[in-house]
């Protein structure tokens, strides 16, 4: 009997007050921890012991933490742990209630910041990094720098209305997030922005009802530097096969770069209808006569289908990546109509557009978005007044048309030559998110490292067209957060065509020879 009593006492001590064995989800997550990591259950499966939050919004339901509202939430409110954490691994599952009555506003885990009072007599506000999930992903610096990490693979792997397995790993100044086995981001921040703090579950400011359930909530302090939920591809065993391709010959020298029509002219304004979660058609008319070239540049937070004279010319669900399209071919002499069907998937909502009309003599006229454009609700076609949210350059979107990072490298995309194939997508400690790409003849491998995220849907064996986006410049791996950049290399492949083996060569002569 004494022996049994001793074992029970040890189990209670290891759980620090949490009841192990009561939550099947937690037990599965504990089983994923590496040997040597001590599990701590942040949630006991019964009540909110060890947590602090507004009882109007937070409760325990069927052994899960429930965050929900019926009335408006004036400012984002959080359920905080009583203890603070700095280096940790957090494993949990989250499910967002999806219905016509419920908002699709995202939730988040608040980490490495500080509790603050917020608007609406909210004693449970937060300032600092938010690891977002469900309808929006990445990192948002609340009451600070706004978005610091893009959505990455989050939208592609999210299980809407179902349970999503999330891993957040914090080691030093490096923050990683995995959702449903896929790396969403790997980000190294500046140390002055991070500090030990409580961990908070977020219920976002919102007028419409929201509901989230959380379970598991297993934490290990001072974790090993490895992700335990990442569905790793089998490494160092792939035998690459390069699909046949044809090299384009006889194309002559590359044409001189076209004039950047958006470097001058008035700044467009961010605009939106009266409700953030409204679905609108926003547009205007303009007149042209025999133009030399007409180009539109536009973006929307979050979703946009852009049309000219009722013909779809572009679509986007990433406000960080504006679309730029030559629309000369769909125009007619006289009056033309440009409009965008726009939606929002939670958080800030805004639309931005600029049209450049180049005349035969080289002069350029501009059309920019503003409150003089018209907007109608898509459900009932009633006209609504537009709100002016500020000109290009205001936060949280900043200068999204030509944003430049601290290293002087445009936070934009890089493109590939025709006939190339994505051979391997790989994550490493030093290179971070990487792409290995084979050229058409199978002699060379091109290597791209330190990417912030892959383009949505990018996969191995994918054939790449000229100008196609494959990823975004970033700071993953051992790159400095203060100097995001692209690490590019060319390797001469051996006869076995192994993506992980090759002789590095100086890429400059090859790139210089292909330059105009």
Image (cartoon, rainbow, N blue to C red):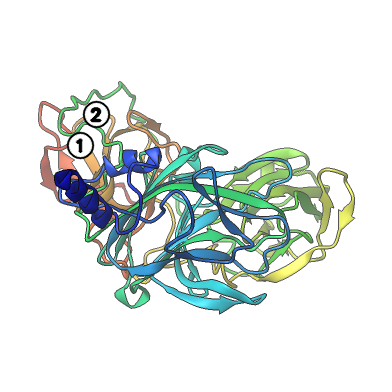
Number of other residues with Cα within 10 Å of mark 2, as a class: few under 14, some 14 to 19, many 20 or more:
some
The residue furthest right is: 382
Label pair 1/2, CB-CB below 8 angstroms: yes
Q: Residue at x 88, y 44 (%)?
A: 380
Quarter-of-image position of residue 458? top left
Let me know if residue 489 appears in the view.
no
Q: Is residue 71 left or right of residue 112?
A: right
SS assignment at label 2: loop
The one of 368 and 315 positioned closer to us in this rendering: 315
Residue 416 x %, y %: 37, 42
* Residue at x 39% of width, y 42% of height: 22
Measured Cα–Cα span from mark 1 to mark 2 = 8 Å
Q: Which mark is residue 334?
A: none
**Disc 1 element:** strand
Quick one: 123 or 428, which is closer to the camera? Answer: 123
- Image-based side of 47 in relation to 172, left or right: right
Q: Locate residue 515 relative to residue 138 in the image: left or right.
A: left
Q: Residue furthest front?
A: 1
Disc 1 crowd rating (10 Å Cα; few below 14, some 14-19, many 20+) is: many
- 332, 110: nearer the viewer: 110
Q: Which residue is mark 1?
A: 444
Residue in the image at 68% along x and 68% along y: 74
Task: Find residue 107 and report its horizontal and vertical position in percent.
Answer: 54, 55
Residue 227 in view here: yes
- The x, y position of residue 496, in whole percent, is 11, 26
Percent position of residue 35, x then y: 16, 46
Q: Is residue 228 above or below residue 348?
A: above
Identify the image quadrant of the N terminus.
top left
Above-or-below relation of 75 to 513: below
Residue topped by disc 2: 441
Which residue of the protein is positioned furthest toward the top in this rendering? 244
């Amino acid at each position: 009997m004494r022996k049994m009593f001793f074992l029970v006492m040890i189990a209670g001590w290891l759980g620090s007050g949490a009841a192990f064995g009561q939550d099947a989800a937690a037990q599965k997550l504990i089983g994923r921890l590496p040997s040597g990591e001590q599990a701590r259950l942040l949630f006991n499966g019964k009540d909110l012991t060890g947590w602090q939050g507004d009882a109007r919004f937070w409760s325990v339901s069927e052994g899960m933490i429930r965050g929900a509202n019926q009335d408006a939430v004036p400012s984002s409110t959080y359920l905080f742990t009583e203890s603070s954490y700095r280096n940790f691994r957090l494993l949990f599952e989250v499910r967002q209630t999806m219905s016509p009555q419920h908002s699709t506003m995202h939730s988040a885990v608040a980490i490495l910041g500080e509790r603050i009072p917020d608007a609406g007599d909210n004693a449970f506000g937060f300032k600092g990094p938010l690891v977002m999930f469900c309808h929006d992903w990445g990192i948002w610096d609340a009451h600070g720098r706004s978005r610091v990490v893009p959505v990455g693979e989050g939208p592609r792997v999210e299980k809407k209305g179902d349970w999503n397995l999330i891993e957040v790993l914090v080691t030093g100044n490096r923050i990683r997030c995995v959702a449903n086995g896929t790396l969403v981001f790997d980000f190294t921040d500046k140390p002055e922005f991070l500090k030990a703090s409580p961990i908070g579950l977020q219920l976002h400011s919102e007028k419409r009802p929201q509901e989230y359930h959380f379970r598991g909530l297993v934490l290990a302090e001072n974790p090993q530097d490895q992700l335990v939920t990442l569905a790793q591809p089998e490494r160092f065993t792939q035998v690459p096969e390069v699909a046949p391709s044809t090299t384009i010959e006889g194309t002559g020298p590359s044409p001189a770069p076209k004039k950047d029509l958006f470097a001058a002219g008035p700044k467009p304004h961010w605009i939106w209808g009266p409700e953030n979660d409204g679905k609108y058609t926003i547009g205007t008319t303009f007149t042209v006569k025999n133009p030399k070239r007409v180009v539109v540049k536009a973006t929307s937070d979050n979703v946009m289908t852009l049309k000219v004279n009722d013909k779809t010319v572009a679509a986007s669900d990433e406000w960080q990546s504006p679309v730029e399209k030559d629309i000369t071919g769909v125009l007619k002499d006289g009056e033309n109509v440009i409009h965008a069907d726009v939606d929002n998937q939670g958080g800030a909502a805004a639309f931005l557009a600029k049209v450049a009309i180049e005349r035969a003599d080289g002069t350029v006229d501009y059309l920019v978005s503003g409150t003089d454009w018209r907007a109608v609700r898509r459900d009932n076609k009633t006209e609504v007044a537009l709100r002016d949210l500020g000109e290009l350059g205001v936060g949280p979107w900043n200068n999204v048309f030509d944003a430049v990072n601290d290293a002087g490298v445009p936070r934009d995309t890089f493109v590939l030559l025709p006939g190339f194939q994505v051979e391997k997508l790989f994550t490493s400690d030093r290179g971070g998110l990487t792409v290995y790409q084979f050229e058409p003849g199978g002699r060379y491998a091109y290597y791209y490292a330190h990417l912030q995220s892959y383009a949505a849907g990018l996969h191995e064996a994918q054939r790449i067209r000229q100008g196609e986006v494959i990823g975004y410049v970033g700071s993953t791996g051992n790159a400095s957060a203060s100097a995001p950049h692209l690490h590019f290399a060319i390797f001469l492949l051996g006869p076995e065509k192994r993506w992980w083996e090759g002789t590095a060569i100086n890429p400059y002569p090859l790139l210089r020879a292909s330059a105009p």
